[in-house]
Amino acid sequence: MSVKILALDTSTENCSVALLIDDRIYSRSEVAPRDHTKKVLPMVDEVLKEAGVELKQLDALAFGRGPGSFTGVRIGIGIAQGLAFGADLPMIGISTLKAMAEASHRLHGATSVASAIDARMSEVYWGRFSREANGEWREVDAECVVAPQLLVENSQADDATWTTAGTGWAAYKQDLDALPYPQQAGEVEFPDAQDIVQLAKLEWEQGHTVPVEESSPVYLRDNVTWKKLPGRE
């Protein structure tokens, strides 16, 4: 099935955009925690020009729905909604934790991934995912925000080796190393739009899109007045 999907993500320090046209991906990515609002739209223009398409010719617009920095998630969905509204495109929200699992598969062939984003306040955004044969990721641990010590106390041993992804592993290494299952260090530190767009393609093929007005972020934490990334307002 021919498909054209644009994805963007500003939920963490990484700012990224990717355009999927059939099986080809055009992407831009830069770690720039203070400049997401300056960089994301030029990145969108660059990938559209490289592919030779206009926004209104696309089938859907995907975005990293969180969890992540409250300000970053809010920036991302706001820009995505503006673009989708102007071009009359449906939207697809993708979990940033699941996107890192997809990246771990792309880079390492990993099929069991434990994603942890540093949530500040001595907590992590957490999720464990197992890859199915059709490319979808099944939640083994439901996405949550949790103190690493509490996560360790409530985890059960299993035989799978879990590839680690996200900033939470470095931030809380001593605690998370105590989890009762084998771990394998991965290279993925942040979610990236090139993985979000691949997951969005699966959602698109199943008809899982929403109108602009129904797209929503996922913060996981009820109290979103937590410490933001340096330089964020």
Image: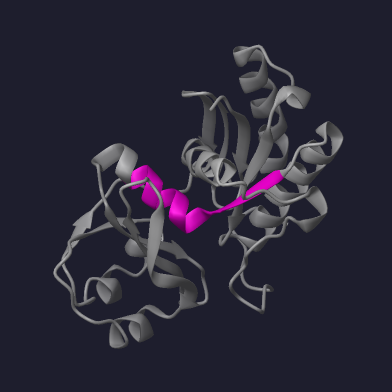
x, y (%) of residue 151? 35, 81
In screen coordinates, is 180 left or right of 75? left
x, y (%) of residue 47? 61, 21
In screen coordinates, is 63 left or right of 196? right
Pick the front one: 191 or 208: 208
Q: Quadrant of residue 114?
A: bottom left
Q: What residue lies at 42% left-to-right and 80% top-to-bottom? A: 147
The residue lying furthest to the right in this view is: 86
Q: What residue lies at 19% left-to-right and 78% top-to-bottom? A: 157
Question: What secondary structure is the magenta-colored segment mainly?
Answer: helix
In screen coordinates, is 171 left or right of 30? left
Q: Quadrant of residue 174?
A: bottom left
x, y (%) of residue 168? 39, 64
Q: What residue lies at 46% left-to-right and 65% top-to-bottom? A: 118
Q: What residue lies at 68% left-to-right and 38% top-to-bottom? A: 61
Relative vertical location of residue 181 with respect to residue 116 in this rendering, above or below: below
Point out the image quarter for the C terminus.
bottom right
The part of the chain drawn in magenta is: 91-104
Pick the front one: 87 or 31: 87
Q: Is residue 143 visible?
A: yes
x, y (%) of residue 2? 56, 24
